[in-house]
C-alpha cells in the first residue's frame, strides 16, 4: 500500500499544526470527561519509565474484557482521527497511549499511530497465516520454521511480546502470552543457534517478564536458560555456535573456519545471562559469561583488535578478520551495554569497550573521497572498504558510549556517531531503503557495487541508530530520516499479507523475498515507535536494549546490595 498523506503531518512529515492541535485537544477533553472514570482502570505508564530495581513493575494490565464499556466505538459519522475514532484508538491501541495523549505529552500522534498500524498489520497477518511458525511468508501466505531455533516455534510471537506490550496492543499481547503459556514447548531436539535462541527467545522472554511481571515468562526463560548451559562445556568454556537443545551436544558451524566460534555469537550472551542469574539466584550463568570475558581480556589482540574467529579448544584466534558488521558487531555492543546495565559499575567492560574503540578508530575508521565516515573491515592488516548494513548499529552504540570514555572525548564520540549514522542514511538512496553491504572503492560512495549485496531484509540497524541519535541529540533530522524509512517500508515492503524484504534496493520494480523476519517486529518497528515517542518511554538511563531490541532493566547498585543481603538469609527478594 502506498502511504497516504496523513492529515496534520507537515511537508516534512513532522508535527501537528496549532489549530489542529487545538481542535484535537478539545475533542480529547470531551473524551476525558466521558472516560474519566475509566482512567482509574488504566495501568500506570510509569512502569515503563521509572528506574526499576529489577523491575517487577506492577501487576499486568487489565485484560481486554475488563475494559470499561463506555469505550465502545463512536457511532458512524463521528469525528475520526487518522481514520480511527478516538475510542477505537483507545480500544485498539491501548490505554497506555491515549493516557499519554490525554496528558498532552505526546510528540506526534500521527507517527505513533502509523507505527502501531504497521505493527498491527504485521502481527495480524502473522497470526492469520503463520501462527505458531517462526516467521510469516507474506506472499505465499504461510509460515516458515527454518532451522535456526532447534525446533523451537513461535519466534515471531516471542520476539513481539514486548513490542505489543509497549505499544499498548493489549489484546494481541494477551494472545501472544497465551501462546507462550500453552504452546511454547522447550523440549525440542533440534540444532539451534545458541546466539539466535539467546537474543530472540531468552531476550524476548526476559523483557516480557520485566515489563509485565507475568510469572510464565520467568518460568519459561529459566527452563530455556538451563538448556543452553551445555554449550559451554568446551576446553576453554568458549561455547560452540550450535547446540542440540535436547541432548545438550554442541558443535561449531560448518562454515566457521577450523571449528571456531564466532566473536559476535559468544560475545553476545552477557546481558541475558546476567539477568538469568539475577532472576534465578544461580550464579552459574554469570560465571559462564565472565569466563568468556576473562579469556578475551587476557588474550593478545592484533593491533588491539578482536578478530571474528576463535578456537573453543585452544582459545586462540583462528583468522585475523575484524569487522564491526556481521560476525563481530554485537560483541562490541555488549561491552558498552554491560557497563551501562551494571549501573556503570562494570569497569572491566568499560575499559575493554573504550580500548576496542581506540583500536577501531586507529585501524578501521575511514573517510571516503566524498567525505563520508565509514568503518572498513580488516583482513590481517589489509582494509576492505566495505560496510555492512549490520555495522550501521554502531552509530547508536558509539552515541550511547559517548559519556563515559576518556576525559574530553564526549563530543568526539557524538560527532563520530553522527557521521556514521549520516553515512548509513546516505546508503539508503534512492529507494530510501539500504543494501545489505555498501562500498567505498572504485568510485563508490556508500553504494552496493555487487548485485548480491543489494537486498534489504527489513533489518533495523539504521533505524536503531536514528532512534539513539534522536534521544541523544534531539536533532529533528533523525525523525525525518525515520519518517522516510516508514514511507519506504510502506511503499516497497508492504504487501497484501504483511511486510516482505526486497531483493534489490536499486530496482525500480521491486521483487519481494517473501519473508517477514521476526526482527522486523521486535526491532525495526519498536525502534521506529520509540523514535517518535517521548524520551520517558523506556528511558535509556533505566533500560538497556539487547541486540534484538528487547529492553532489560539496569541492575541498580542498591538492588545488588539488597540481593546479597537477602541471599545471606537464604532467599531472594528479586522474584
Ligand atoms: C538481529 O537479529 C540482531 O540485531 C542481531 O544482532 C543481528 N542482526 C539482526 C537483524 O538485522
Image: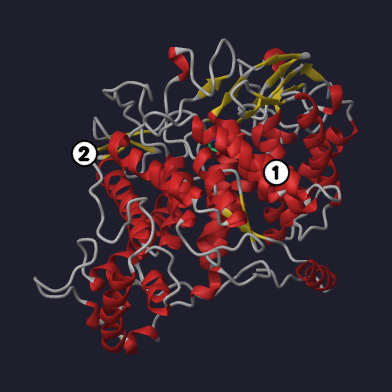
Q: How far across and down, in percent of the image, does residue 271 sit?
A: 68, 49
Residue found 23% across the figure and 69% down from its top: 88
Q: Secondary structure at mark 1?
A: helix
Q: Quadrant of residue 280?
A: bottom right
For label 1, the crowd category at 10 Å Cα-Cα, with few meaning under 14, some 14 to 19 and many 20 or more, is: many
Q: Which residue occupies the foreground of this view, 310 or 71?
A: 71
Residue 514 seen in the current view = yes
What residue lies at 84% left-to-right and 37% top-to-bottom?
355
> Which corner quadrant of the image does residue 430 belong to?
top left
Residue 63: x %, y % from top left: 36, 72
Residue beneath disc 1: 334
Quadrant (top left, top right, bottom left, bottom right) of the C terminus: bottom right
47 or 238: nearer the viewer: 47
Query: x, y percentage for residue 25?
Result: 31, 78
Circle 2 residues within 10 Å: few <14, some 14–19, many ≥20: few
Q: CA distance from mark 2 to mark 1?
A: 37 Å
Q: Is residue 327 left or right of residue 207?
A: right
Which quadrant of the figure shows ligand 1? top right
In this rendering, the answer to whether 368 lies above or below 79 is: above
Q: Which residue is mark 2?
A: 496
Q: Is residue 105 above or below residue 297?
A: below
Instruction: Choose top left, top right, bottom left or bottom right for residue 312.
Output: top right
Amino acid at each position: 500500500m502506498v502511504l497516504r498523506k496523513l492529515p496534520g503531518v507537515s511537508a516534512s512529515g513532522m508535527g501537528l499544526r496549532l489549530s489542529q492541535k487545538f481542535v484535537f485537544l478539545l475533542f480529547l477533553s470531551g473524551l476525558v470527561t466521558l472516560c474519566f472514570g475509566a482512567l482509574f482502570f488504566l495501568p500506570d505508564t510509569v512502569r515503563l519509565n521509572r528506574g526499576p530495581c529489577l523491575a517487577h513493575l506492577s501487576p499486568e494490565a487489565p485484560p481486554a474484557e475488563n475494559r470499561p464499556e463506555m469505550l465502545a466505538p463512536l457511532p458512524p459519522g463521528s469525528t475520526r482521527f487518522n481514520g480511527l475514532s478516538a475510542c477505537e484508538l483507545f480500544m485498539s491501541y491501548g490505554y497506555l497511549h491515549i493516557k499519554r495523549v490525554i496528558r498532552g505529552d505526546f510528540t506526534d500522534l500521527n507517527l505513533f499511530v502509523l507505527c502501531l498500524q504497521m505493527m498491527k498489520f504485521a502481527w495480524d497477518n502473522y497470526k492469520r497465516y503463520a501462527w505458531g511458525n517462526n516467521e510469516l511468508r507474506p506472499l505465499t501466505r504461510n509460515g516458515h520454521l527454518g532451522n535456526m531455533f532447534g525446533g523451537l516455534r513461535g519466534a515471531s510471537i516471542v520476539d513481539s511480546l514486548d513490542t505489543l506490550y509497549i505499544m499498548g496492543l493489549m489484546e494481541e499481547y494477551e494472545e501472544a502470552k497465551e501462546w507462550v503459556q500453552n504452546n511454547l514447548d522447550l523440549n525440542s531436539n533440534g540444532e539451534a543457534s545458541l546466539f539466535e535462541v539467546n537474543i530472540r527467545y531468552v531476550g524476548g522472554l526476559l523483557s516480557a517478564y520485566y515489563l509485565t511481571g507475568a510469572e510464565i515468562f520467568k518460568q519459561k526463560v529459566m527452563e530455556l536458560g538451563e538448556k543452553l548451559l551445555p554449550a559451554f562445556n568446551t576446553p576453554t568454556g568458549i561455547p560452540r555456535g550450535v547446540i542440540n537443545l535436547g541432548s545438550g551436544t554442541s558443535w561449531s558451524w560448518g562454515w566457521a573456519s577450523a571449528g571456531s566460534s564466532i566473536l559476535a555469537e559468544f560475545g553476545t550472551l552477557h546481558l541475558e545471562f546476567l539477568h538469568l542469574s539475577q532472576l534465578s539466584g544461580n550464579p552459574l550463568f554469570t560465571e559462564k559469561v565472565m569466563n568468556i570475558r576473562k579469556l578475551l581480556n587476557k588474550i593478545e589482540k592484533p593491533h588491539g583488535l578482536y578478530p571474528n574467529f576463535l578456537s573453543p579448544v585452544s582459545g586462540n584466534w583462528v583468522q585475523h578478520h575484524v569487522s564491526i558488521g556481521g560476525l563481530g558487531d554485537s560483541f562490541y555492543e555488549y561491552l558498552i551495554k554491560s557497563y551501562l546495565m551494571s549501573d556503570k559499575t562494570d569497569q572491566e567492560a568499560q575499559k575493554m569497550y573504550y580500548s576496542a574503540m581506540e583500536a577501531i578508530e586507529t585501524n578501521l575508521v575511514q573517510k571516503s573521497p566524498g567525505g563520508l565516515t565509514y568503518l572498513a573491515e580488516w583482513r590481517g592488516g589489509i582494509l576492505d572498504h566495505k560496510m555492512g548494513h549490520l555495522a550501521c548499529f554502531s552509530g547508536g552504540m558509539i552515541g550511547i558510549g559517548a559519556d563515559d570514555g576518556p576525559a574530553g572525548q564526549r563530543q568526539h564520540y557524538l560527532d563520530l556517531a553522527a557521521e556514521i549514522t549520516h553515512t548509513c542514511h546516505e546508503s539508503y538512496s534512492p529507494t530510501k531503503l539500504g543494501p545489505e553491504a555498501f562500498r567505498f572503492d572504485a568510485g563508490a560512495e556508500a553504494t552496493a557495487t555487487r548485485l548480491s549485496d543489494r537486498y534489504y531484509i527489513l533489518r533495523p540497524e539504521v533505524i536503531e541508530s536514528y532512534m539513539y541519535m534522536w534521544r541523544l541529540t534531539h536533532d529533528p533530522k533523525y525523525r525525518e530520516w525515520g519518517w522516510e524509512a516508514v514511507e519506504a517500508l510502506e511503499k516497497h515492503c508492504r504487501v497484501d499479507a504483511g511486510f516482505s524484504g526486497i531483493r534489490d534496493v536499486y530496482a525500480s520494480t521491486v521483487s519481494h523475498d517473501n519473508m517477514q523476519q521476526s526482527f522486523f517486529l521486535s526491532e525495526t518497528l519498536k525502534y521506529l515507535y520509540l523514535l517518535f515517542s517521548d524520551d520517558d518511554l523506556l528511558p535509556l538511563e533505566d533500560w538497556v536494549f539487547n541486540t534484538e531490541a528487547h529492553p532489560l532493566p539496569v541492575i541498580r547498585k542498591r538492588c545488588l546490595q539488597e540481593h546479597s543481603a537477602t541471599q545471606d538469609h537464604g532467599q531472594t527478594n528479586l522474584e
